[in-house]
Amino acid sequence: VINTNASARKTSERFYQNVAVLALHAEELDMWIGLENPGDGSDNLLNTAADAATLLNAIAHPRVALNYDAGNTVSHRPTIDATVDAIDAMPLCLYTHIKDVTKREQGYFFSGLGQGQVDCAKILQHIAQTPLCLSIEMPLRLHRRPDAQPNRGAKPVALAEIETALTEALHFVQTHLK
């Protein structure tokens, strides 16, 4: 599985041309393309789960499906319940990220699983009932400004902090993926 964002709506014609070629190539390589929803607030072909069926029907290739990211929905479409949207997207997913985020006055900050606005436990319970592939995504150095644009911290995150965060995340997943 190779994950990538779908396309801004304004470049959709070029996207559909390119993804048709890429889907055939993916088929030759015995791989799949997972289209991920963005987090930057732009107008995209995949803003929410409600866009997914139309997008995938237009692509019409079995090697292309969704890679849904509920953490992105929090900043991309703040009025949407990211947990419900993730669950709604699952039937069209081949892959998903589990990521949590908290909105503050200064923007959107990625947090430990179960510590933010996404009900990661509920998403994991639904994933456990599917054949979906799952990864933990913890962009500890990144946050999104109030306008949802990404902002990378100036300094790398200390290895000990990364190890602690991943250990806690793995424990969370193992506890809730039942």
Image: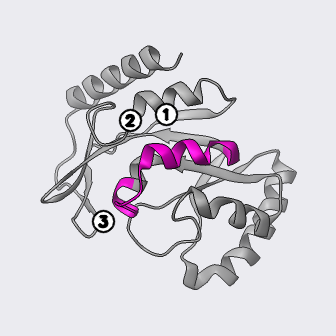
**Residue 30, position as x, y percentages in the image:** 82, 44
Query: Which of label 2 and label 3 is nearer to you?
Result: 2
Q: Quick check: 134 left or right of 92?
A: left
Q: CA distance from mark 2 to mark 1?
A: 6 Å
The C terminus: image quadrant: top right
Q: Which residue is mark 1?
A: 123
Q: Residue at x 30, y 65 (%)?
A: 148
Q: Quadrant of the N terminus?
A: top right
Mark number displayed over residue 119: 2
Mark 3 and mark 1 lie on one chain; the one further toward the N terminus is: 1
CA gap between label 2 and label 3 equals 20 Å
How crowded pointer 2 is (Cα within 10 Å; few <14, some 14-19, many 20+) is rated as many
Tag 2 and tag 1, C-beta contact below 8 Å: yes
- Colour convention of the picture: one colour
> What residue is at 31 percent from the left and 21 percent from the top?
168
Q: Which residues are magenta?
A: 74-93
Cα–Cα gap, marks 3 and 1: 23 Å
Residue 177 placement (x, y as % from top left)? 51, 20
Query: Which amino acid is tagged 2?
Result: Asp
Q: Name the one closer to the observer, 140 or 36.
A: 36
| Picture quadrant of residue 126 | top right
86 part of magenta stretch: yes
Percent x, y of residue 75: 34, 59
Looking at the picture, which amino acid does disc 3 mark? Answer: Ala
